[in-house]
Structures are given as C-alpha cells and as structure tokens.
C-alpha cells in the first residue's frame, strides 16, 4: 500500500550529504518556517541556484 501524494515529478536520485549540526539546525529551522520538509527546502535552494 502506497502512502503520500502522487506526483508527476518523481524523485529517483538520492544525494547523501554530510553537514555539521549548525548547518542541519539552520536548514531545519528554515524548512519549518516555510512549512516544508528539509528535502523540499533543499530542492528549492538548488532550483533557485539553477535559475541564476
């Protein structure tokens, strides 16, 4: 049984990233502020950088 929302934009690739606790806390706070997951927040950062 599948859970979650269906999507047309499948995320098939994974990036494993090592960061320190300060960076993790910063990303977590920003994601919470925008009411998105940390993964979604990081995807938004990457997309914004791709558009520059």
Image (tube, grey):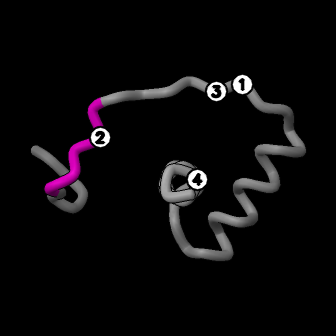
Whether tag 3 and tag 1 are in contact, CB under 8 A, the answer is yes
Q: Which residue is mark 3?
A: 17
Extreme-front residue of the structure: 52
Whether tag 1 and tag 4 are in contact, CB under 8 A, the answer is no
Measured Cα–Cα span from mark 1 to mark 4: 20 Å
Residue 32 placement (x, y as % from top left) = 65, 69
Q: How many marks?
A: 4
Please tell me whether mark 2 sits on a helix, a strand or a loop: loop
Residue 1 placement (x, y as % from top left) = 10, 44
Q: Which residues are magenta?
A: 8-12
Measured Cα–Cα span from mark 2 to mark 3: 16 Å
Single out the mark in the foreground, 4 or 3. Answer: 4
Question: Mark 2 or mark 3: which comes first in sequence?
Answer: 2
Q: Which residue is mark 4?
A: 49
Measured Cα–Cα span from mark 2 to mark 4: 18 Å
Q: Which mark is residue 18?
A: 1
Q: Which residue is mark 2?
A: 11
């Amino acid at each position: 049984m599948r859970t979650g929302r269906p999507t047309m934009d499948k995320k098939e690739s994974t990036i494993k990233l090592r960061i320190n606790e300060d960076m993790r806390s910063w990303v977590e706070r920003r994601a919470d502020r925008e009411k998105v997951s940390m993964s979604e927040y990081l995807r938004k950062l990457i997309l914004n950088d791709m558009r520059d």
